[in-house]
């Protein structure tokens, strides 16, 4: 392992990141200088990935970098925002050139793919931890508190893939190499739903990205909007990886598994036909109803009330 200093790291791995017109001054000064698109509302969000907690200690640095940026981009998608800039706070146990090489490659490849510019950061020594802050711009932000009774509830795509992948990624479940690859892809390359988000912006009343599990995250929309949701568990699109398990386990993971980064969103009854005509691939899973008492998510299966055995992921 070759040892290098903080400024070498910044120069060799991050300072050369491509930027865009909106970046007046990028990496290298005390602050970045940024010019937002005229008339836009900025949307900003930060997420930290801690080694051993959010990814395995020895995980490939390129994959970890990809995941760190993608989960943040997903927050922009959930807000109906388009990516502009991000910063990176990196805490490293050692300046390992091999690791940094792979990390910056994975990071900058992902940044290029989604048209977001790295404009600054901080580099410190300590237990491995990666903090990414993203900023985007929105014309009409998709908040959690805009949904109303009667709205249709949709998800952007299959659920349960990342939760099914987790034991494989952690090495707790041995599978063949094809399945292992699919699991790694689900976990490290979640697809931020930026395009779908832009297409639903004119119609959607609320949106959230599914990071903690559908039931938990839809619950956030319900509480913020003061409505309840009726959910048809049989309508949930189940990811192929989850379908490898028993039907009950698959259902459970689709309803409660985190880390898929699909969007859950709501559309007023009157706009449902237009959404369906748009062929976004989104799937209707339920309907919002007036809350009697505390807003809640009422899951049903074949007409019977349904509750998961394990509720959504809790950090603490
Ligand atoms: P300061 O001491 O003013 O905080 P630093 O020495 O930490 O500045 O960083 C110097 C420059 O390099 C700044 O522009 C900062 O944003 C950038 N930078 C530091 N670490 C990173 C990183 N991991 N990724 C991208 N840019 C970084
Ligand atoms: Mg600094």
Image (cartoon, helix red, strand yellow):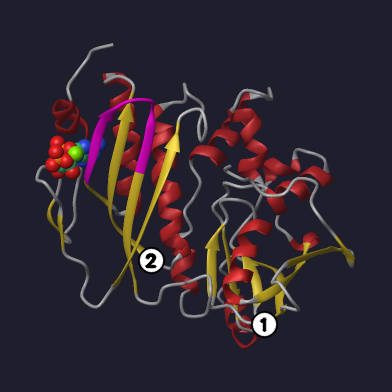
- Relative placement, left or right, of 72 versus 87 is right
* Front position in the image: 86 or 129: 129
Residue appearing at x 65%, y 57% in the figure: 216
- Relative placement, left or right, of 65 versus 31 is right
Q: Is residue 92 magenta?
A: no
Locate residue 113, reporting x and y percent: 34, 49
**Number of marks present in the image shown:** 2
Classify residue 297 by image quadrant: bottom right
Quadrant that contains the N terminus:
top left
Q: Which residue is mark 1?
A: 149
Magenta part of the chain: 120-131
Disc 1 and disc 2: Cα gap in Å? 25 Å
Helix, strand or loop at mark 2: loop
| Residue 243, numbered circle | none
- Relative placement, left or right, of 62 versus 40 is right
Locate residue 304, reporting x and y percent: 90, 64
Residue 16 appears in the rendering: no
Residue appearing at x 38%, y 66% in the figure: 81
Helix, strand or loop at mark 1: loop
Classify residue 127 by image quadrant: top left
Predominant SS along the magenta part: strand
Residue appearing at x 61%, y 58% in the figure: 157
Q: Which residue is mark 2?
A: 81
């Amino acid at each position: 392992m070759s040892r290098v200093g903080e400024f070498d790291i910044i120069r060799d791995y991050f300072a050369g990141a491509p930027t865009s017109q909106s970046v007046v001054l990028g990496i290298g000064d005390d602050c970045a200088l940024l010019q937002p698109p005229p008339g836009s509302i900025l949307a900003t969000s930060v997420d930290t990935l801690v080694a051993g907690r959010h990814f395995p200690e020895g995980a490939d640095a390129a994959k970890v970098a990809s995941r760190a940026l993608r989960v943040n981009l997903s927050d922009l998608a959930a807000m109906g925002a388009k990516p502009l800039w991000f910063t990176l706070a990196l805490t490293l146990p050692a300046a390992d050139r091999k690791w940094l090489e792979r990390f910056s490659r994975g990071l900058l490849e992902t940044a290029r793919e989604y048209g977001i510019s790295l404009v600054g950061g901080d580099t410190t020594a300590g237990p491995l931890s990666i903090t990414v802050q993203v900023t985007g711009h929105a014309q009409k932000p998709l908040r959690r508190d805009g949904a109303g009774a009667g709205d249709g509830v949709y998800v952007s795509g299959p659920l349960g893939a990342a939760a099914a992948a987790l034991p494989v990624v952690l090495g707790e479940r041995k599978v063949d190499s094809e399945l292992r690859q699919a699991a790694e892809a689900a976990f490290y390359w979640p697809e931020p739903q930026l395009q779908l988000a832009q297409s639903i912006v004119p119609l959607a009343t609320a949106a959230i990205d599914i990071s903690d599990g559908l039931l938990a995250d839809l619950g956030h929309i319900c509480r913020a909007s003061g409505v309840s949701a009726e959910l048809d568990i049989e309508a949930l699109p189940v990811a192929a990886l989850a379908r490898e398990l028993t039907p009950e386990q698959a259902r459970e993971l689709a309803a409660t598994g985190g880390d898929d980064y699909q969007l859950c969103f709501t559309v007023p009854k009157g706009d449902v036909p237009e959404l369906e005509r748009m062929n976004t691939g989104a799937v209707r899973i339920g309907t919002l109803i007036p809350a009697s008492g505390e807003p809640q998510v009422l899951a049903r299966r074949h007409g019977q009330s349904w509750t998961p055995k394990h509720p959504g992921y809790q950090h603490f």
